[in-house]
Image: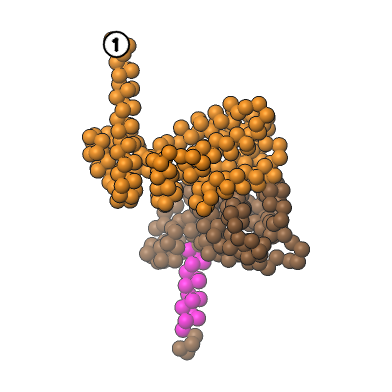
Chain colours: A brown, B orange
């Protein structure tokens, strides 16, 4: 029984996180991000505001956008575990193409969330902060995979992570994503 | 005499601005940016703190880095007034190459200021904000000069303005600046 306790605690924590995220998402979609308070979200998830901030120190933005560590790990894995013959830039394009405004075939709920993020300046800005926070980790995995660690790698990592903020607001986000990577592939032919 | 009054007021304002900027620069260089208060700067320039903030709403960072409008105008002019046969990207490289950490032959005081900005996270961050704030103006002048106004122009403007933050901290900033523009010229051969 001593062994199951930590498992139960973890499950309870995950359930609370999920309840808060879902309550936030539903309220934001219903009334707009700026018109919902953390107190209302905590209330809808049947927790205290202090519990909300314990789980989401980043506050309202983090409730719907998650945290940077998830992106960092997923980005690094996309580059490191890419299939034979797939370039680093292709792997990064393919990874971004599945997310948020670039998802070509989202379920209706995901599409509404992506539209909300694009239309809400605070959420767009936070999403950018989460991506740009991955810069060092992305530069590291590119350097490791390309076998070169220099300024060109750091510049490439920054340029890749600037793409979502800019391409996500274009009329056709997926086409803009592809265009951005076409420029980078010309600039960095070895990657 | 009614006509000279506005001129005198403008001169006095300019003199106050300059006294504040010089006092800030000298104090920052002597003791480090983080160890100097706005009260000390106002005192050294023989003005009130409220006067300091009236002239520099951006506070300590603005005192040494100036404001975005100056950069915006200078950037646009560099592209618009470039010599015959000089590409847009070449004009932008040449313009940045004269500034801050990229100046190949700075006077000793300018070099100390550039080193201070690079070594002080708050100043580096503020300098980046000033540059990125020029994005719309730069995209506009590139679009006008290239005769095309699309996503590729917006992406190029952002990528150019990200260069100073990243290249400025390299061991050889000028070489990094050149390398960054070499990538952009390959990616955007028409510019």
Circle 1 is placed at which residue position? B2
The answer to which of B186 and A70 lies nearer the viewer is B186
Residue A164 in percent (x, y) is at: 60, 50
A119 in magenta: no
Q: Quadrant of the N terminus of chain B?
A: top left
The image quadrant of residue B11 is top left
Residue A185 in percent (x, y) is at: 71, 51
Q: Taking B53 as reference, is B169 left or right?
A: right
Q: Taking B29 as reference, is B169 left or right?
A: right
Residue B184 in view of the camera: yes
User: On screen, B56 above or below B32?
Assistant: above
Residue at the bottom extreme? Answer: A1
Q: Secondary structure at mark 1?
A: loop
Residue A109 in view of the camera: no
Determine the main secondary structure of the stretch shown in magenta. helix
Mark 1 burial class by Cα count in 10 Å: few <14, some 14-19, many 20+: few
Q: Taking B159 as reference, is B22 left or right?
A: left
């Amino acid at each position: 029984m001593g062994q199951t306790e930590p498992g139960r605690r973890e499950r309870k924590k995950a359930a609370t996180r999920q309840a808060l995220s879902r309550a936030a998402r539903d309220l934001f979609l219903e009334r707009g991000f700026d018109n919902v308070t953390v107190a209302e979200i905590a209330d809808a998830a049947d927790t205290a505001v202090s519990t909300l901030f314990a789980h989401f120190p980043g506050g309202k933005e983090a409730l719907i956008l998650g945290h940077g560590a998830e992106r960092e790990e997923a980005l690094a894995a996309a580059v490191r575990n890419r299939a034979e013959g797939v370039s680093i830039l292709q792997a990064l394009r393919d990874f971004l193409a599945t997310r948020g405004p670039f998802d070509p075939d989202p379920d209706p709920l995901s599409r509404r969330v992506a539209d909300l993020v694009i239309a809400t300046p605070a959420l767009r800005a936070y999403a950018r902060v989460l991506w740009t926070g991955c810069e060092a980790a992305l530069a590291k995995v590119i350097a490791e995979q390309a076998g070169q660690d220099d300024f060109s790698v750091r510049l490439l990592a920054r340029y890749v992570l600037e793409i979502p903020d800019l391409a996500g607001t274009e009329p056709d986000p997926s086409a803009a994503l592809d265009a951005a990577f076409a420029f980078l592939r010309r600039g960095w032919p070895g990657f």
